[in-house]
């Protein structure tokens, strides 16, 4: 997933939660803290991101969810970690297969 | 582990009493995950005196309150209840699909979606005769003391 696509998706999700007009306010939020987000909305944003990208946001990552740039960076890291974890599982499975065939022969 | 709680046990854990305790029984609970409660709505409920004058309909805000009380029981269950109180911080995506009337049995289901820091996001729905009558999300905020009148 490209950085820009991810950024757009995150912006949309955040505006869905905060209820602000995406077209009107997009310019305001580039890398500055968004103004009308309180701690309750941060929890909603975290839960929304977790559900959408099937990741887990930990408590220490919460302060990062206050700017778009930091949120995109965090999401990229978490998605990458998730993919690597999945690849790791697949690798171990594929390694087992030839071993089984050998045993059968 | 215990999964059923009587009206008396609910009263011991939650800081509510007549006419505001809106849970009759807990029929299933999984700690830190989900809870299912029952509220039997009778024609003698005190709020039916005025809601409405001509026809008794359970107020939607009290259905939210029943969800909040179920959620609070789930959050408080197994915790040190004397140290913390909880405030309702936000009501999100609340929808009401059917009126709740005298004689209905509300099955209230709540599950914890995410707990971060001092806040907890829960989602819940209420069914009557296996049909959803209301659903939505609530956010609770943990406070230090539970003896304030405003704190749940």
Image (cartoon, rainbow, N blue to C red):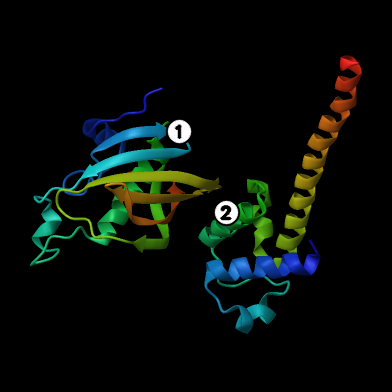
Element on which disc 1 rests: loop
Residue carrying label 1:
B31
Q: On the rendered structure, is A39 left or right of A9?
A: left
**Do tags 1 and 2 sit on the same chain?**
no
Q: Are marks 1 and 2 in contact (CB under 8 Å)?
A: no
Q: On the rendered structure, is A91 left or right of A39?
A: right
Residue A8 percent coordinates (x, y): 70, 70
Residue B47 percent coordinates (x, y): 14, 57
Q: On the rendered structure, is A55 left or right of B33?
A: right
Residue B55 percent coordinates (x, y): 11, 64
Element on which disc 2 rests: helix
**Chain containing the residue with disc 2:** A
- Is residue A92 among what the camera can see? yes
Numbered label tally: 2
In the rendered view, tell whether residue A100 sits above or below residue B13.
above
**Residue for point 12% across, 51% down:** B45
In this rendered view, identify the residue nearer to me: B120 or A92: A92
Quarter of the image for residue A29 reads bottom right
**Residue for point 8% across, 67% down:** B54
**Chain containing the residue with disc 1:** B
**Residue for point 39% across, 54% down:** B88
> What crowding class fits label 1: few (fewer than 14 Cα within 10 Å), some (14-19), or many (20 or more)?
some
In this rendered view, identify the residue nearer to me: A16 or B74: A16
Residue carrying label 2:
A47
Task: Specify the quadrant that holds the N terminus of chain B.
Answer: top left
């Amino acid at each position: 997933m490209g950085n820009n696509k991810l950024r757009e998706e995150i912006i949309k999700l955040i505006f869905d939660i905060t209820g602000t007009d995406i077209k009107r306010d997009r310019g305001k939020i580039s890398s500055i803290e968004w103004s009308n987000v309180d701690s309750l909305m941060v929890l909603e944003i975290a839960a929304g991101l977790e559900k959408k990208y099937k990741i887990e946001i930990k408590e220490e990552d919460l302060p990062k969810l206050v700017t778009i740039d930091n949120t995109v960076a965090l999401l990229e890291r978490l998605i990458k970690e998730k993919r690597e974890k999945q690849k790791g599982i697949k690798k171990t499975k594929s390694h087992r297969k030839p071993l089984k065939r050998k045993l059968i022969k | 582990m215990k999964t059923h709680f009587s009206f008396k046990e609910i009263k011991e854990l939650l800081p509510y009493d007549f006419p505001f305790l809106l849970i009759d029984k807990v029929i299933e609970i999984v700690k830190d995950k989900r809870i299912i409660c029952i509220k039997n709505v009778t024609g003698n409920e005190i709020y039916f005196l005025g809601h409405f004058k001509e026809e008794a309909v359970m107020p939607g805000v009290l259905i939210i309150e029943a969800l909040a009380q179920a959620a609070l029981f789930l959050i408080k269950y197994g915790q040190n209840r004397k140290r913390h109180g909880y405030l309702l911080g936000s009501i999100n995506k609340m929808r009401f699909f059917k009126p709740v009337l005298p004689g209905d049995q509300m099955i209230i289901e709540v599950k914890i979606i995410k707990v971060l820091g001092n806040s907890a996001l829960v989602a819940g729905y209420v069914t009557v005769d296996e049909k959803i009558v209301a659903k939505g999300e609530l956010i609770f905020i943990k406070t230090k003391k539970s003896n304030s009148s405003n704190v749940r």
